[in-house]
Amino acid sequence: MRAVCVALALMACCAPGARGEGFALNEWSARGLALAGGLVGRADDASAVAYNAAGITQLPGTHIMAGMAFISPSGSLVTNSGGQDHSTYTKPAIWNAPHAYITHQLSDRAWAGLGVFSRFGLGNSYPGGWAGKYNVYDIGVQTVSFVPTLAIKLNDIVSVSVGVEAMNAHMYMGNKIRTRPTAAPQTFDNDMQLEGYGWGYGAQFGLHMRFNDQWSMGVSYKSQVTMNINGDVEFAYQGSNLLTHYAHLPEARNCSANTTLQLPDSAAMGITYRPLDNLSLEVGTVWTRWSTYNALNIYMDNGYSSINNKEWRDGWNFNGSVEYKPLDWWALRAGFSIETPVVNEKHADYMIPTNGRRMLSLGTGFNWNDWTLDLTYAHLWINSVDYGTTDAAGIATVVSGGNSKDVSANLFMFSLGYSF
């Protein structure tokens, strides 16, 4: 049924990649967030495994890092039904994105690394009776990537890396769907819950060049990932005598569903300049091929299948950052990024009420002996989405017009590291 297709569409889309808007994350370390992702050219701590693993050749011995990001989104959706506008606010919630890394120097030329981090995530919750309930009222998505990596120092300037990525995705979603008993004309709102898991595999490559003590440059590439998603659909009320509101759709009964989606690849570049030993600046960009997310094939075990159009466009992130160490044990950081819109508003839904965003981040770092502690705060300003032309299920047939409004997010993050 249409609602199931929309649900599985999000479940499949929960597994694409790297900050280029959409539902991508780059909260891979507190220092990296404070620098707005500006660790592609620097790439000089353990979280380089995520940003640009070729840079771990700058790390002697063994380094460990772990931490967590706490993401708090907020905003409202304005819907128009019955000729009146209604504002619905998202429920307060905090979503987390953990990370952990280890790097080890194998020889004068070879380093090994392992990263565990979240490349994609999404979370929104609305009142169960709001106007967009037929599209979604509760959604949570999280992916976790496991990336073992090998980096080789070719000479004093150039290092390269290659990694294998195994990505796990978990998603849950709730929405309403109209159903009716076979012998009765009256319809009622039935709760539909979906939960699914999937695995996908890809590769990551990195290049790092340290030309001298002042200039360095990095390039990283994350390949496409094919996600195979399997989920279960459950209704609050089910049975052979309960039909959906739409005559051509199947019965409201619990079933399994699956989909396969080719997720986008991405490429990042950063150029770093160190005018002083205690001062560095970096500018960079990330390109993500969201245009691979153009449609979604859904298959249910009751024989129903459908295609949902998405037709997103490729996304760009442009970032700049500065890091200053007034003392040997203390660092100050700041970053700013701009991301271009990727969502096609002709097919927009309430699961991702964003279409381009800006971020300002501030952070600090402390080190004593072999320990490091990084702390960061960041704020996201998120552009609104216009739903006046969308054909998305659960919106076009119920709501006429509307838009997202005052959507933003606050991010808090910490990373703790140890070297030996």
Image (cartoon, rainbow, N blue to C red):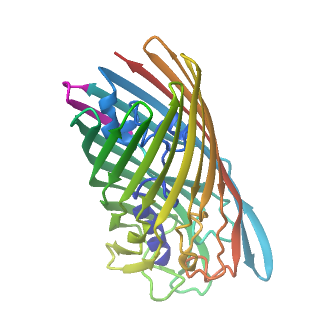
Residue 304 lies in what quarter of the image?
bottom left
Residue 185 lies in what quarter of the image?
bottom right
Residue 222 vs residue 152, the one in the foreground:
152
Quadrant (top left, top right, bottom left, bottom right) of the C terminus: top left
In the image, residue 132 above or below residue 198: below
Residue at image point 26% right, 42% down: 161
Residue 344 vs residue 182, the one in the foreground:
344
Residue at image point 20% right, 30% down: 109
Q: Main secondary structure of the magenta part?
A: strand
Look at the image and say whether residue 107 sits in the magenta stretch.
Answer: yes
Residue 4 coordinates in the image, percent (x, y)? 46, 71
Residue 11 coordinates in the image, percent (x, y)? 43, 61
Residue 297 vs residue 161, the one in the foreground:
161
In the rendered picture of this protein, how many numbered marks are placed on residues?
A: 0
Residue 141 coordinates in the image, percent (x, y)? 48, 53
Residue 43 lies in what quarter of the image?
top left
Look at the image and say whether residue 327 sits in the magenta stretch.
Answer: no
Quadrant (top left, top right, bottom left, bottom right) of the N terminus: bottom left
Residue at image point 43% right, 61% down: 288
- Residue positioned most to the right: 84
Residue 207 in the figure: left or right of residue 277: left
- Residue positioned most to the top: 369
Residue 110 coordinates in the image, percent (x, y)? 20, 31
Residue at image point 38% right, 33% down: 212
- Region of the chain picked out in magenta, as a range: 105-116
Residue 332 vs residue 128, the one in the foreground:
332
